[in-house]
Image: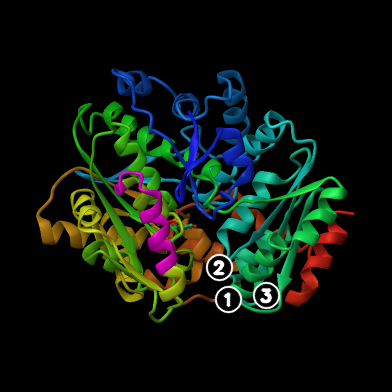
Amino acid sequence: MRYISTRDNNMKVTSARAIAQGLSVDGGLFVPETLPRLPEGAIDELCSMNYRQRAVYVMKLFLEDYSVAELTDFVTRAYSPRGFDTPRVAPVKKLDANTHFLELWHGPTCAFKDMALQMLPHLLTAAMRKNGEDKKVCVLVATSGDTGKAALEGFADVENTRICVFYPRDGVSDIQKLQMTSQSGSNVLVCAVNGNFDDAQAAVKDIFSDPDMREELSQNGWMLSSANSINWGRLLPQIVYYISAYCDLVNAREINAGDPVDFCVPTGNFGDILAGYYAKNMGLPVKTLICASNKNDVLTDFIKTGTYDRRREFYTTISPSMDILVSSNLERLLYDLSGGNDAETAGYMAQLREKGVYTVSDAIKSAMDGLFAAGSCDDAETKSVIARAFKEHDYLMDTHTAVAYGVLEKYRAQTGDKTCAVVVSTASPYKFCTAVLEAIGEVPGSAGPELIGQLESASGVPAPMPLKALSGKSPRFTDSYDKAELPDVVRRFLK
Ligand SMILES: *Cc1c(COP(=O)(O)O)cnc(C)c1O
């Protein structure tokens, strides 16, 4: 199976090329030329497998140029008991008769980015070999929090790679900062940038698009790559957990094979929910995909009206990983719903770039109406959802998951839909201690890792080991730089 660019149907590459390259040269994103279908009887077969076996089965449908033996090796390393605190990897927890939580935060950094970023380094280094590329890869990441740490954990000590993470000096939580600056590994570098997330991101983009710098690094045997969710190698591992959750519900006799299920997804860059859309189109019995936003509700408006308008105020919320106004992966959805129309897709993206707004065709709008629902929750609602679920169900959730659960409740109240629903739970509540403590009526007593202990005693829910271990750690990386210094920082790192 080939991969094609959303902006040029003539741009066709192998899966190994799509993964190594990340973005197509025309600026488009790579998508499978045809989406594979789950074969007859696949759900039955998958039900009897464990998570890793399911991952091999599903990924193999997309990766012709990778062998089953290779993929088996990758999943064994990516989803190992050393990294994940449960052999189920992505367990489904029952809240009530028709509500379940798919917990995607049992990995090394306690957020769902691990599901993909534990796998990406293996897919990427194998892709380099398959492409006959003799250079080593340096992954550059600008992060507002979760992605940086997950990428560091994924790439730390992976042969023939280095990873360099830039975070805004005053733009991440104390826990997120210490998670990154205490990272171990001989091939990692973590730098604070004097500025905000946009400054860090702009600096990385400048390095990527500087031909002289690329040439110089190439002479020294280095190629630059990105761990952002535009890379197909990050999206693919996410399709697996939708299918796996469905199988878990069948095995637990919560549903019968073939019954419809709704998924409600806390959404930022549209990568997670897009993976659910692909799972549905492969034949998984999904009825509605519910897209949940925080106060930055650009996607809610888009799904309801067909107009995407980024010209609006940006809010900083207690669910920071969803504070985003341009959702890159939406491009893949538009391409698919336009029937693979590259010119139409490129047109929408050009309007977004030039005017900050576009309106999709009636055909795309009505296709979306049959697939998606959408809603949003502000910070006050998010906190009351956390409080209520903890009080009534003794279930503690983080702020992003709470946005999704709150939106699911509103959706049910509006539509009367009683379909079995899975809320995609994207982070451990211990990553966002301050807001979660406040939600359950506690006054946060301090800052940083000490809050973990406070939340543990207040809730009685054990904190994940990787976060507990933080309190004994001191930062390895303490330097901060101005934006203009970053190219030289990268040059020195790759000497
Ligand atoms: C990244 C992230 C999201 C948003 O996922 P997208 O794929 O960007 O839509 C939601 N919750 C958490 C905790 C995240 O880290």
Disc 3/disc 2 C-alpha distance (Å): 21 Å
- Observer-side mark, 1 or 3, equals 3
Q: How crowded is mark 1: few (under 14 residues within 10 Å), some or many (20 or more)?
A: few
As drawn, the residue found furthest toward the right would be: 495
* Label 2 sits on residue: 451
Query: Whole-percent x and y of residue 346?
Result: 43, 57
x 37%, y 39%: residue: 242
* Label 3 sits on residue: 169
Along the line of sight, which residue is nearer the eye, 451 or 90? 90
Along the line of sight, which residue is nearer the eye, 5 or 246? 5
Main SS, magenta residues = helix
Magenta stretch: includes residue 128: no
Q: Please, what is the three-letter code of the amino acid marked with disc 2?
A: Leu
Figure label count: 3
Stretch of the chain drawn in magenta: 337-351
Secondary element at tag 3: loop
Secondary element at tag 1: loop
Disc 2/disc 1 C-alpha distance (Å): 6 Å
